[in-house]
Amino acid sequence: MIIMLLWTVLMASIVTWTKLREQQQVINLATKEARANFNKDLAFRKWATEHGGIYVNPDERTPPNPYLAHLPKRDVTTNGDMLTLMNPAYMMRQLTTEFEEIYNIKGNITALILTNPINAPDPWEKEVLEKFKASDTKRIIKEAIKITDIDHVPHLRLMKPMYMTKGCVKCHGHLGFKDGDLRGGISVSIPLTAYYQDADRVTRNMALVVVALWVFGIIMIVRHVKYLHKQNLMEERLRRAHDTLEQRVTNRTAELSKTLAQLESTQAQLVNAAKLASIGTMTTGIAHELNSPLQVISLTLEEIQEALDDDDIDKSTILSDTHSVMGNVKRLTNVISSLKNLSHNGEKTDYQRINPAESCEKILTAMSAIFQKSHISIKKHYADNLPEIDADNHLLEQALKSLFDNATTALAETKQPTIELTVDQQNEEIIIRITDNGSGIPEKNIEHIFDPFFTTKEIGEGTGLGLSIAHHIITDHHGTLKVSSTVDGGTTFTITLPIPADN
Ligand code: HEC
């Protein structure tokens, strides 16, 4: 808007400036023309004065001038023809009045003191003459210019002073004028119509150009403003889209972190629940394991007491009862020592360089009677040149036995029960695999299989500690114990044990 206004003002000022300049030009040109005319008048008058006036044949247009009556030689006769003297002012008046229509320029000779009242000044001329008179001695004012309407037509009027010269004294001396005195003035009027027409034409043409320029400028400004507006709109949209996106991301992030927190707490709850469940299983197991032998012991001791109360004591019954008590006490001791193993407060580990294949072989031999009884066939494969490992022989054998025990139990109802044993080396590790083709472990039990006291056996058949202890032992040896199983497809336990760097 401001740019449009500035543009308009600029264009308008160009037009105005052109107009003013043209007007000034009109005045300049007209002044020049007026001066030229004046100079021509003056030259002509000078010429006429130097000749002391001109003798002409008098006629109706030019009768003898009564204002020259005081001159003795106003009228002369040559060869019978009468001649009369024409003074310069007379000639000029005749010239200007008669040729005014042709030249369209008015020239006027006038003065404050008049010889002929016809030369009386008009108000402006009088005013100027007074000014000339006031500055007479110094001759400061050399001319006066005025733009004014004469008969509704604009004119430029120029007036210059006339001073007496020697030639003038002949005719004007009798009125007291001396050489050098201010006598009067000549005014010239130039009509400005033609000049103004020219100027108007120039201004009009200029105005046309400027208007065209203005329209063009306005169109350009409007287009640019529209373009800027459009760009702003797009920027605004982009910013809004960006803001929305950011907002969405923030919201989504907040949601996600909330969900994450919920998940974490749920997980913690689950872990807690699992821990509680496993503690539950454990305590139930422990309670059971301790309870049943204790019950047997308690009952047997009661029997012994009754038998002792009897008069005829049956020694053999008491003996077998004490055997039973001893057996159950041993069972309790076993449970307790297993628990000690599990918490690992008991025996110290005794690491030695051992051959893993030898350990396996030792357990297989020890358990061969059990395998035979259950018709289990053993397939074994030992890699050549197996390196030795650092292990507590006793503990490692205990772990292996637990795994073979587990396999034997799993094979109870299998038609062709088989246990496969492979001992291999892979990179820096010994890999021991024990695979059975038994009943397998249901998926829901797999994650609990190493939990202490977790057992699927009937109560009293196993402590539920064997696999847990085996896991414990292998982990203690910086190894891993993993299980993979499918129901009715068998189970594979995989032990990895690190080979010492110096072996
Ligand atoms: C031959 C005589 C003659 C000479 C020379 C002459 N004048 Fe005049 N002048 C007259 C007469 C006569 C008039 C008045 C009658 C007329 O207007 O014709 C007059 C008129 C004028 C007027 C107009 C005012 C008025 O008195 O009516 C002025 C101004 C003037 N003369 C100036 C001069 C000057 C300046 C010179 C010298 C350069 C000069 N004249 C030379 C005779 C003369």
Image (tube, rainbow, N blue to C red):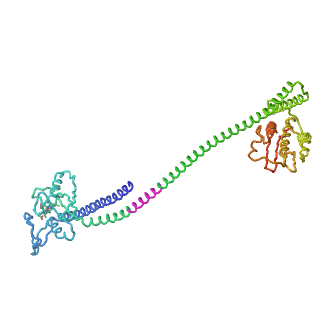
Left or right, 317 with respect to 139, comes to: right
Asked where in the image residue 9 lies, by quadrant, the reply is bottom left
Q: Position of residue 211 (x, y in %)?
A: 35, 63
Q: Which stretch is magenta?
A: 215-231
Name the quadrant of the N terminus.
bottom left
Of 116 and 501, nearer the camera is 501
Q: Position of residue 221 (x, y in %)?
A: 41, 58
Is 57 a magenta residue?
A: no
How far across and down, in percent of the image, does residue 136 sit?
18, 52
Q: Main secondary structure of the magenta part?
A: helix
Who is closer to the viewer here, 419 or 79?
A: 419
Left or right of 393? Residue 110 is left
Would residue 249 be seen by someone viewing this image from the given angle?
Answer: yes
Find residue 103 and report its image quarter: bottom left
Magenta-drawn stretch contains 228 = yes
Location of the C terminus by quadrant is: top right
Q: Quadrant of ligand 1?
A: bottom left
Residue at the front extreme, as displayed: 311
* Quarter of the figure with residue 57: bottom left
Left or right of 216 on screen, residue 482: right
13 is higher (above) or lower (below) than 452:
below
Q: Is residue 425 left or right of residue 112?
A: right
Between 348 and 189, the one lying in front of the other is: 348
What residue is shown at x 72% (from left), y 36% (from top)?
Answer: 280
